């Protein structure tokens, strides 16, 4: 007996160990048959260990009762929500992909453990910690790549995936058990309830689209619409569009395949018979001024634009058959909006000199703070500058301080001062002579020592 679980990450096939755990297998099979597990979230993900599921609402919902067995579900009797779990002594949590029922001790008898609807699938080997706590009833035979996706999913501190992983559908491949009284198999997969939808965090990509019966062409159309909306929003954020939902004007006609010699006046003359033209512009190269062979014609009203569209398609102008279509360009609207925005900015900023576009030159310092002396300020002190002027031949101003006693009124040293200076010079000369004599004696002694050393060696 096998069951197929269709999850948001892929399909998982579980083989049931009916001979070793018949009651557990019957409960799981019948819950899958009534689609009880549909939209149940995967939670308590522990990398390389296990994950848990089977509660239709999950631990994030305040309305969750933890799930119910098939007998409590079909009867509505709360006393039958759980049943005693059987632990086969030969079944251990050794292999990866072991499937077991989550159990809890009975309040009236702690030695008895009971199960409901939640089950555990191991993500690693040798998870013997679960022995005696989770009752084994099956094993995964296909879908180990799905187990790896769940194993590497980004989870919060409680092990709940940030992007929802849910059981989308269950298919019973073989059921040998008779149905319990009151069981009714639904004809189709039921949609998620409002309580289940409130538990959605970030839906997986497939859940974002209710497109189970949508063909590939419709999916491609939706994808292109999403890309177009994203690009329009980007242009709005960059300031290239006034708003993302902007539409091209309905009174502007697009004309292409023009002859390069066709000018604005020519087109305005030809298209003017359908109504009043507000503007007619042949688009030209900005550098060379050559025609790019397409133009935009703006009419006063939509009716004139439509009349020109139906009458001028394929008309021969200057030996060229033109193509006419309604304009899909919003560049003119963007230009008008951008110009208006810039004008508002200039109005707030103001102008200078009577011209709005001009602005007074900004300076780091105000002119009123500048010191505009006629002479440059020097970095030298006043006394040093006096000395520099004296050395350059310009005598400094005469100081009024009295001269030393050794000088006469003209500033010339007297005879006593000169004699004292001569005596000092003689003393210095004598000291220098004595030092020189000592150096000569030292040199001589060194030379004699060398001669004595050579004689001793001989």
Image (cartoon, rainbow, N blue to C red):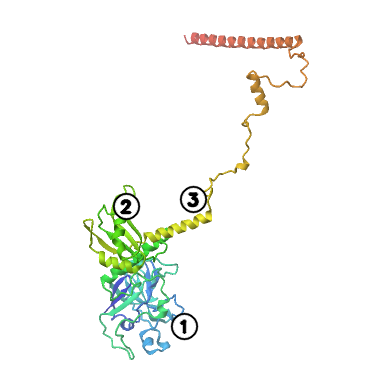
Q: Which mark is residue 357?
A: 3
In this rendering, the label closer to the viewer, 1 or 3: 3
Q: Is residue 11 left or right of residue 376?
A: left
> Looking at the image, which is closer to me, 266 or 369?
266
Q: Is residue 120 left or right of residue 403?
A: left
**Would you call the spot at circle 1 few (<14 residues within 10 Å), some (14-19), or many (20 or more)?**
few
Q: Secondary structure at mark 3?
A: loop
Q: Quadrant of residue 207?
A: bottom left
Taking the spot 67% from the left edge, 24% from the top edge, the residue there is 386
Q: Is residue 440 left or right of residue 454?
A: right
Residue tagged 2: 284
Q: Is residue 321 left or right of residue 400?
A: left
**Would you call the spot at circle 3 few (<14 residues within 10 Å), some (14-19), or many (20 or more)?**
few
In this rendering, the label closer to the viewer, 2 or 1: 2
Q: Quadrant of residue 63?
A: bottom left
Q: From this viewpoint, is residue 152 visible?
A: no
Lower position in the chain sequence, tag 1 or tag 3: 1
Residue tagged 1: 107
Q: Secondary structure at mark 1?
A: loop
Lower position in the chain sequence, tag 2 or tag 3: 2
């Amino acid at each position: 007996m096998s069951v197929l679980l269709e999850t948001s990450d892929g399909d998982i096939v579980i083989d049931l160990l009916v001979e070793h755990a018949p009651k557990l297998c019957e409960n799981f099979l019948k819950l899958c048959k009534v689609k009880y597990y549909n939209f149940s979230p995967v939670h308590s993900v522990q990398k390389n260990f296990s994950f848990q599921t089977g509660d239709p609402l999950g631990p994030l919902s305040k309305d969750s009762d933890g799930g119910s067995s098939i007998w409590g579900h079909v009867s509505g009797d709360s006393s039958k929500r759980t049943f005693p779990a059987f632990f086969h002594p030969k079944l251990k949590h050794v292999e990866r992909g072991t499937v077991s029922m989550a159990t809890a001790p009975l309040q009236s008898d702690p030695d008895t453990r009971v199960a409901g609807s939640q089950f555990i699938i191991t993500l690693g080997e040798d998870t013997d910690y679960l022995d005696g706590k989770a009752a084994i009833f099956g094993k995964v035979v296909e879908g180990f790549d799905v187990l790896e996706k769940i194993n590497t999913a980004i989870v919060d501190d409680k092990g709940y995936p940030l992007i929802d992983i849910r059981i989308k559908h269950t298919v019973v491949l073989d059921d040998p058990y008779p149905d319990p009284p009151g069981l009714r198999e639904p004809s189709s997969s039921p949609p998620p309830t409002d309580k289940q939808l409130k538990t959605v965090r970030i839906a997986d990509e497939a859940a974002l689209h209710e497109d189970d019966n949508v063909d590939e062409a419709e999916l491609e159309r939706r994808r292109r619409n999403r890309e177009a909306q994203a690009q329009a929003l980007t242009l709005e954020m960059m300031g290239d569009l006034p708003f993302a939902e902007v539409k091209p004007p309905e009174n502007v006609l697009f004309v292409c395949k023009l002859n390069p010699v066709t000018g604005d006046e020519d087109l305005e003359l030809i298209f003017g018979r359908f109504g009043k033209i507000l503007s007619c512009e042949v688009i030209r190269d900005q550098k060379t001024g050559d025609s790019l062979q397409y133009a935009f014609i703006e009419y006063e009203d939509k009716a004139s634009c439509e009349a020109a569209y139906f009458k001028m398609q394929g008309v021969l102008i200057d030996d060229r058959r033109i193509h006419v279509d309604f304009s899909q360009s919003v560049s003119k609207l963007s230009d008008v909006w951008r110009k208006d925005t810039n004008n508002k900015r200039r109005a707030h900023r103001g102008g200078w000199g009577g011209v709005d576009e001009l602005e007074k030159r900004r300076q780091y310092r105000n002119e009123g703070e500048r010191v505009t002396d006629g002479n440059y300020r020097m970095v030298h002190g006043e006394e040093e500058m006096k000395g520099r002027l004296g050395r350059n031949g310009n005598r400094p101003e005469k100081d009024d301080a009295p001269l030393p006693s050794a000088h006469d009124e003209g500033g010339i040293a007297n005879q006593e001062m000169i004699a004292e200076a001569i005596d000092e010079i003689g003393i210095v000369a004598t000291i220098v002579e004595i030092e020189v004599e000592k150096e000569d004696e030292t040199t001589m002694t060194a030379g004699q020592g060398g001669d004595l050393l050579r004689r001793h060696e001989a």
